[in-house]
Image (cartoon, rainbow, N blue to C red):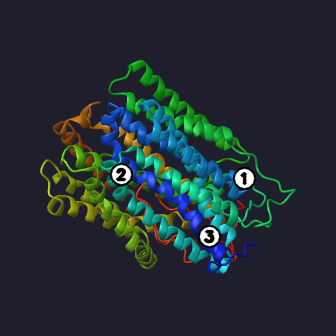
Amino acid sequence: MPDVRLASPRGRWILLTTVLGSSMAMLDSTVVNVALPRIGRDLDADLAVLQWTVNAYLLTLAGLILLGGSLGDHYGRRKVFVIGVVWFAAASLLCGLAPNAGVLIAARALQGVGGALLTPGSLALIQASFHHDDRGRAVGLWSGFGGIGAAVGPFLGGWLVDGPGWRWVFLLNVPLAVVCVPVALRHVPESDGRPVRAGAAADAAGTSAGVAAGAGKGRPHGRRHAPFDVLGAFLGALALALVTYALIEAPGGSTGVVSGAAVAGLAAGAAFVVVERRSPDPMLPLDIFASRQFTAVNLVTLCVYAAFGGFFFLSAVQLQVVVGWSALGAGTALLPTTVLMLLLSARSGELAEHIGPRIPLTVGPLLCAAGMLLMLRVGPGASYAADVLPAVLVLGCGMVTLVAPLTATVLASVDVARAGVASGVNNAAARAAGLVAVAALPLLTGMSAEAYRSAGAFDEAFGRAMVLCAAVLVVGAVLAFATVRRPAPDCRRPECRTHGSVLAPPLEGERAKGRLTLGDG
């Protein structure tokens, strides 16, 4: 049984390690958008390169995060977490030193692999290490400090871009890793998972949270683990990669190549479904979608996070290219959304428990849609107080209203033993939605390869993009109103009460009889 107490020196070291690790990935998810215009100018890159700079990371992260947690259960959570931190830092160093766009994109893809290892691993270490009486508070502190990291990201990214340069947005991860890794090796106990049954790979991704029988004593011998669903992970990532390529390259690429990539991507997606259906231990157990509410809430998730992904990709560029602000000004302008989530997400979850999730999941997307339509006022000569701040505040209020109830409804829509897989699928769906939105919006809005170099051209396309994002959010609101129902009173409720990420919902693990376990199916 895990027995580390939060108030002990070892408990504080574990918390520090996991916060540092998760903050690396959290920072990168928020700071890179602010750096995009400067990256494009310095590397003489077109819009497609900027899209790939964002999407190469999201592609490998979304495609592999369902697999990443299970590696920790098999080989040891601390070991895989440390590998993830080192991998992420090495890829970040390569990003910072990239001599051209091709190397930068490849390094960003490698960063996503590291993120898929450390993101589920950071919370899994907390859940596998702390005494059950302290686990809830430890998770809350981890979530809160991680949210602060997300809030600092745009401000810090803007300051770095305007000061030492955009490369330091990536190089910043290296000193964080230098602190994180020795602390993890010295103070964090090793643990692995219990025997894994079908679907546990995805449960592990939902935080890889099992209580190791030998926590702190190395990995116990004689334990049987389910085989890794490597084929499923490969086909899922391949499908996302090919569809993304087709969407990004469609405006200027060869029609035959683009069409071939699109067809191949759809075929890979179909093959992924077949493999997952037939596999005895699938990365994504498809029977979880037998819950109509779970399926419906994930459709709402796709709508909501597609709009968020498109908004945060384009708005930082709009504020710099069209409005004429510095990178620091653009990053700081978007800060209220994260601050509002940090301050109010826990209260929003409490409200949803009293009134049910249907109203928050309907009103929240509508508020977000209103915020994006208010962004139509943000053009040349825009004022922060009169134009940008109202839009960002309305958007932030909408995000506060919907994110906590969304996570709670996902967990409540499946059996408590499958909360981990439900959370992992929902988190991966959100990231995949953002990936597709970043690839598709420039195509759908007629944004040319050089649009970000022209204030007028980008402004026109940005306006069309905000209308599209608002429309997708309205679709999500209608879906929520038509499908979401009040959960049973004894359902599983989220452990992460405070959340600050704007690009994905929080991960959750399993909890039963006062302890956390792997989902046993």
Q: CA distance from mark 1 to mark 3?
A: 34 Å
Against 3, residue 254 (above or below) is: above
Task: Give the mark nearer the N terminus: 3 vs 2.
Answer: 3
Q: Which residue shows up at 43% across the image and 74% down it? A: 352
Task: Give the mark nearer the N terminus: 1 vs 3.
Answer: 3
Task: Give the mark nearer the N terminus: 2 vs 1.
Answer: 2
Find residue 160 and name its label: 2
Q: Is residue 322 something one can see in this rendering? A: yes
Residue under circle 3?
13
Seen from this angle, which residue lies furthest right?
A: 222
Please name which of the two marks, 2 or 1, marks the residue nearer to the observer.
Answer: 2
Q: CA distance from mark 3 to mark 2?
A: 28 Å
User: Which of 323 and 295 lies nearest the eye of the viewer?
Assistant: 323
Against 160, residue 236 (above or below) is: above
Q: Is residue 510 something one can see in this rendering? A: no
333 lies left or right of 152:
left
350 lies left or right of 366:
right
Q: Which residue shows up at 50% across the image and 59% down it? A: 23
Please name which of the two marks, 1 or 3, marks the residue nearer to the observer.
Answer: 3
Q: Label 3: state its secondary structure.
A: helix
Q: Residues within 10 Å of mark 1 (few under 14, many from 20)?
A: some
Residue 439 falls in image quadrant: top left
Q: Label 2: state its secondary structure.
A: helix
Residue under circle 1?
198
